[in-house]
Image: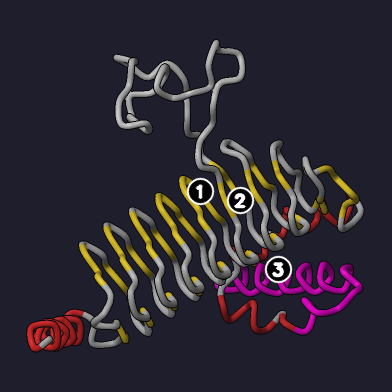
């Protein structure tokens, strides 16, 4: 018991020295990982070979492996991230498992999300990996080389909302602004601003007209600076999407005019 207390004290002092601008629990393991400012890592977390930007919160019992997280992100309790890259202003709800996934910014993920976890062949004699994989999932393998592509990267765009208990198949691409209803099983690509649901997931409708979708994709507001986003906040919460588009056009015109006057 004394040894455990001493170990925690040593780790606490180590983390205070390494991360003076953050709060890292001495009950967590942070190995070969860089973190920014205002980081909060709760107890019993495991971070390995990763990088975290500023203002990232990681709640209890999470694992983050070989991943890159940008600024203003929250990972909720008992979530597992491996080989994940994630933009800014995202949150992942509890008990989620994401692997080999590239994620944009401003995404909202409900609890128990599963991204991938491997494919099996359907046209071989057997679907068991003992015949086609060298990873030895069963403890051994009859294959001398990999005969099937088990893992494919998943791409999730910007401003995507995913409901609770959603499964996303390996290799799927989800467009910007898409909404995936709770309990959906996503096995095919989802276009920009589509609302989908069901098993397997199918398009229910699109959030906006083709004209508005085209405008929003050209605006790329998810790449704006925080100052511009704060300035535009009142337009983000209006049901009149055209008012947001018009404000953006005026801002761009003013900025271009200002740049021209300085040249």
Q: Is residue 90 left or right of residue 67?
A: right
Query: What residue is at 37 percent from the left and 31 percent from the top?
Result: 138
Looking at the rendered structure, the secondary structure element under dot 3 is: helix
Lower position in the chain sequence, tag 1 or tag 3: 1
Q: Is residue 220 left or right of residue 197?
A: left
Looking at the rendered structure, the secondary structure element under dot 2 is: strand
List x then y, in percent, for residue 87: 51, 62
List x then y, in percent, for residue 43: 34, 80
List x then y, in percent, for residue 26: 23, 82
Query: What residue is at 52 percent from the left and 68 percent from the top?
Result: 88
Highlighted magenta segment, given as a residue range? 234-263
Lower position in the chain sequence, tag 1 or tag 2: 1
Quarter occupied by residue 33? bottom left
Residue to which mark 1 is pinned:
101
Quarter occupied by residue 169? top right
Residue to which mark 2 is pinned:
156
Q: Looking at the picture, tell me which residue is in the foreground, 237 or 137.
A: 137
Frontmost of labels 3 and 2 is 2
């Amino acid at each position: 018991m004394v040894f455990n207390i001493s170990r925690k004290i040593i780790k606490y002092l180590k983390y205070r020295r390494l991360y003076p601008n953050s709060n890292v629990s001495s009950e967590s393991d942070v190995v070969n990982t860089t973190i920014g400012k205002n980081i909060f890592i709760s107890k019993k977390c495991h971070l390995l070979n990763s990088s975290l930007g500023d203002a990232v919160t990681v709640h209890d019992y999470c694992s983050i492996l070989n991943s890159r997280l940008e600024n203003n992100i929250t990972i909720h309790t008992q979530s597992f991230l491996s080989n994940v890259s994630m933009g800014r202003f995202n949150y992942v709800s509890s008990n989620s498992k994401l692997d080999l996934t590239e994620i944009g910014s401003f995404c909202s993920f409900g609890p128990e999300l599963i991204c991938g976890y491997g494919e099996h062949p359907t046209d071989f004699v057997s679907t068991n990996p003992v015949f086609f994989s060298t990873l030895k999932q069963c403890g051994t393998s009859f294959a001398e080389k990999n005969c099937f592509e088990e893992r494919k990267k998943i791409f999730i765009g910007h401003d995507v909302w995913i409901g609770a208990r959603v499964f996303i198949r390996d290799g799927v691409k989800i467009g910007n602004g898409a909404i995936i209803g709770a309990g959906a099983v996503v096995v095919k690509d989802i276009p920009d601003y589509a609302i989908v649901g069901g098993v397997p997931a199918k398009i229910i409708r699109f959030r906006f007209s083709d004209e508005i979708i085209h405008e929003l994709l050209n605006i790329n507001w998810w790449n704006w600076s925080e100052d511009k986003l704060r300035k535009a906040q009142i337009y983000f919460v209006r049901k009149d999407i055209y008012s947001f588009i018009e404000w953006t056009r005026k801002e761009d015109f003013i900025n271009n005019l200002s740049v021209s006057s300085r040249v």
